[in-house]
Amino acid sequence: MSRPRPLIALAGLLLMTAACTTAPPSSQPPSQPPSQQSVPPSTDEIKHSANMKLVANVPLDPPFDGPNAWGTDLAFQGGYAFVGNFEGFTIHDISDPTQPKVTARVKCPGGQNDISVSGDLLFVSVDMARSNDTCESGRGSFADTNWEGIRIFDISDKARPRYVKSVQTDCGSHTHTIVPGKQADRLYLYTSSTGQPESAICPAPQGISIVEVPVQNPEAARVVAKPRLFKTCHDVTSYPEKDLAAAACIGDGWLLDISDPVKPRVLQRITDKVNFSIWHSATFNDAGTKIVFSDELGGGAQPTCSSPDERTKGAAAIYDLTPDRRLELRGYYKIPRLQGPTENCVAHNGALIPVPGRDIMVQAWYQGGVSVWDFTDSRRPREIAFFERGPLDPKLQLGGSWSAYYYNGYIYSSDITKGLDVLRLDDPITDPAESLRLTELNAQTQRSYGGA
């Protein structure tokens, strides 16, 4: 979700000049037309395709039961799922995915608390000013020198995470991405922040900060670089085995060479002024020959899936990556089910389902639910499966699936207000993915299936 700030100002920011390729307008084939639901789902009613079903849900219990205790991003390690929340994070034991159990809830407020894990370390992003860097901090002000940035926890004992270090970054960290170092003893975090247009100390636009983390001595983590490749970025996805990263930077997309993790280099900038409003996130296919960029039109709070005429807006765009590392637009995908006029719905966080020989993605669409779609044919993407709930209770204004990822045979969805959903997908197209077992998954740091 985009930082809860004036979206018009963010969308209108001027980006640095770079090698630029402007995507053609919506002449590309859109995804399939919307399906017509004879009876739309009622409030909180669950609907799903025949090949997808809900097998478990873990609700947001105390201390994550306040009005803004919103669930955010997900990461995985071994038999655990880690779920961010504006109030902290939860560690779930998913050794039996049909009966997930809460191992720990850590109250440590700071939106969005987007999350990642590596070994014994857990990282969360804080992009809302706090009075200090502690978990007891109160809300700060963007007008003074309060704290925002990265918090680091030791999770060697999953039941008792230990806060070990904070790193302040320019204008905080809306999201972050792990980039492994060339040596195993260190890793890097690319932190992205949108800035605050009305702030004297944190004006938009902002670039990225690179935090170096010595794995055996995380207390020594520090900012080591502030490359100004672009001015405002929402999210970066790295593919270290390919020495590539894709950055979704509000007004456009960027392809980066990260062969030197501390000195990323721009390969290409792409724009789509006709169809894209807020470039939000990116996903490579396994071969590294395609990138899916998503458009978070309306910042995640608007009903952009209610019109049959807006098939290329608030959608995902599929770009082929040529052998000479140039991106070329091929098509768009948007969920084929129309949503109600009160349901916030737009393309959001997703990742690949590891099916050999095919390009298949699971993606969150807020109140549009969870969609599994095939983009093996870049020009003709199609939905394979879906899960969704009906509109929220009228007292609630924001909800639905924030992130949805496939991990070791199941799909896990972090629902903003409903908690952790565990979904089972049974389809001959996706069943081959069950043979792959991962030991760790951070969706913004991609690894090839063969390197799992």
Image (spheres, rainbow, N blue to C red):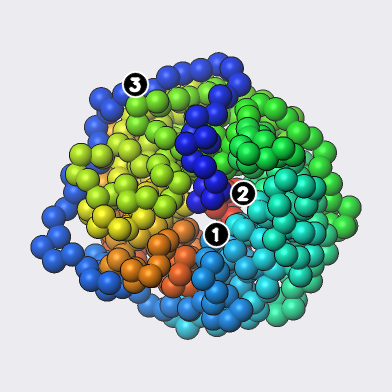
Amino acid at dot 3: Pro
Tell me the quarter of the image containing the C terminus.
Answer: bottom right
Report if the CB atoms under discs 1 and 2 are less than 8 Å apart: yes
Amino acid at dot 2: Thr
Towards the viewer: 75 or 296: 296
Percent from the top left, x then y, of residue 162? 79, 71
The residue that disc 1 covers is 73
- Residue 20 appears in the rendering: yes
Q: Is residue 159 above or below residue 251?
A: below
Percent from the top left, x then y, of residue 86? 59, 64
Q: Secondary structure at mark 1?
A: strand
Q: Residue at x 61, y 72 (%)?
A: 90
Percent from the top left, x then y, of residue 360? 37, 49
Task: Using residue 284 as the reference point, say whether residue 237 is left or right of it.
Answer: right
**Which of marks 3 and 1 precedes in the sequence?**
3
Percent from the top left, x then y, of residue 21? 46, 18
**Which of marks 2 and 1 precedes in the sequence?**
1
Task: For marks 1 and 2, give the CA distance.
Answer: 10 Å
Q: Residue at x 25, y 25 (%)?
A: 27
Towards the viewer: 96 or 154: 154
Q: Secondary structure at mark 3?
A: loop
The mark found on residue 175 in the picture is 2
Task: For marks 3 and 2, give the CA distance.
Answer: 29 Å
Residue neighbourhood size for the residue with mark 3, other residues' Cα within 10 Å, grouped as few (<14), some (14–19), many (≥20): some
Q: Residue at x 53, y 36 (%)?
A: 10
Task: For marks 1 and 3, give the CA distance.
Answer: 32 Å
The residue that disc 3 covers is 24
- Residue 262 appears in the rendering: no
Report if the CB atoms under discs 1 and 3 are less than 8 Å apart: no
The mark found on residue 402 in the picture is none
Q: Is residue 419 above or below residue 407?
A: below
Residue neighbourhood size for the residue with mark 1, other residues' Cα within 10 Å, grouped as few (<14), some (14–19), many (≥20): many
